[in-house]
């Protein structure tokens, strides 16, 4: 089964700091690499996504860095805020928009 | 407001019973998906459907069944054959069908507990 490996499992960051979450994938037949944010008791929501022919994408405080040769991508959250405390999932999207998700990272931003 | 409605939010079931989870969307999306979420394992695909009256197994379809009789509805039945059904179930949709965007719109989930 194709896998997406995500690390760390949990992360604690001080307010104003940078949160970094890493993912690695095994298959090259993916068309998009999205990141989802999930709050307790809610469904995940798309945060930001990148195509494999782009090395970096930035939206506000959120940046995806993509390394195609290493099959790795990461999410950087700049100036982390307590409201960013949530679980973050990386994913790889292939045919029929089926997503393979990483195991998730629980982020806690302390004031 | 457009979105995906899942019901019930919480459900308790005795072992050996089938249970059906409802998923309705008013986004006019053609594609719909069911994922299962377990702590520390991310989301895993159970079934997906690109058009009405057609659906495909995902990675963990054993013990589950679905139907797609209407575009806006994609119910999931958790059968007694599912060995470990206690989980958080998420329904999602996307559009247009067959196009890879990486974007799924999720409902708020149904938490099933088997007693």
Image (cartoon, coloured by chain):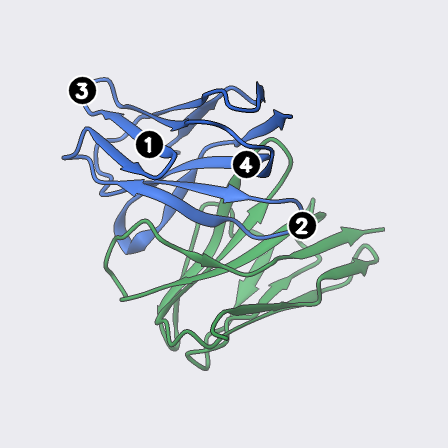
Chain colours: A blue, B green
Q: Identify the element where label 3 is drawn.
A: loop
- Give whichever of discs 4 and 1 has the lower sequence position: 1
In the image, residue B102 above or below residue A2: below
Mark toward the start of the polypeptide (2 vs 1): 2
Both marks 3 and 4 on one chain: yes
Q: Quadrant of the C terminus of chain A?
A: top right
Q: Label 4 crowding class (10 Å Cα cut-off): few <14, some 14-19, many 20+?
A: some
Discs 3 and 1 share one subunit: yes
- Residue A34 drawn above or below residue B17: above
Q: Nearer the viewer, mark 3 or mark 4?
A: 4
The residue where tag 4 is placed is: A84
Q: Residue at x 57, y 48 (%)?
A: B36
Residue carrying label 2: A41
Vertical placement of residue B106 versus B67, above or below? above
Callouts 4 and 2 close, C-beta under 8 Å? no
Q: Residue at x 51, y 23 (%)?
A: A16
> Chain under label 4?
A
Query: Furthest residue to the left?
Result: A53
State which chain disc 1 sits on: A
Eye-nearest disc, 4 or 2: 4
Which comes sooner in the sequence, label 2 or label 3? 2
* Lower sequence index among marks 3 and 4: 3
> Closer to the camera: disc 2 or disc 1?
1
Dividing the picture into quadrants, the one containing residue A38 is top right
Residue under pointer 1: A63
Mark-to-mark CA distance, 3 and 1: 19 Å
Residue A76 % position (x, y): 39, 26
Q: Nearer the viewer, mark 2 or mark 3?
A: 2
Q: Is residue B98 left or right of residue A2?
A: left
Q: Please indicate whether residue B59 sits to the left or right of residue B65 in the image.
A: left
Dot 2 and dot 1 within a common chain: yes
């Amino acid at each position: 089964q194709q896998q997406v490996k995500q690390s760390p499992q949990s992360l604690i960051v001080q307010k104003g700091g940078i949160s970094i979450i890493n993912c690695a994938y095994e298959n090259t037949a993916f068309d998009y690499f999205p990141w989802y944010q999930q709050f307790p008791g809610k469904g995940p929501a798309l945060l930001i996504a990148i195509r494999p022919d782009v090395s970096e994408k930035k939206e506000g405080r959120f940046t995806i860095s993509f390394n195609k040769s290493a099959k790795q991508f990461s999410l950087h959250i700049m100036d982390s805020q307590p409201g960013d405390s949530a679980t973050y999932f990386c994913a790889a999207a292939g045919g029929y928009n089926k997503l393979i998700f990483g195991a998730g990272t629980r982020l806690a931003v302390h004031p | 407001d457009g979105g995906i409605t899942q019901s019930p939010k919480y459900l308790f079931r005795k072992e050996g019973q089938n249970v059906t989870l409802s998923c309705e969307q008013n986004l006019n999306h053609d594609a719909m998906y069911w994922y299962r979420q377990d702590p520390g394992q991310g989301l895993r695909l159970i079934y997906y459907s690109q058009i009405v009256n057609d659906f495909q197994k995902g990675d963990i379809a054993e013990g589950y069944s679905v139907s797609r009789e209407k575009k806006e509805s994609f119910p999931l039945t958790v059968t007694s054959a599912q060995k470990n059904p206690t989980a958080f179930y998420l329904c999602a949709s996307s559009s247009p069908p067959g196009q890879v965007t990486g974007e799924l719109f999720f409902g708020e989930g149904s938490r099933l507990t088997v007693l």
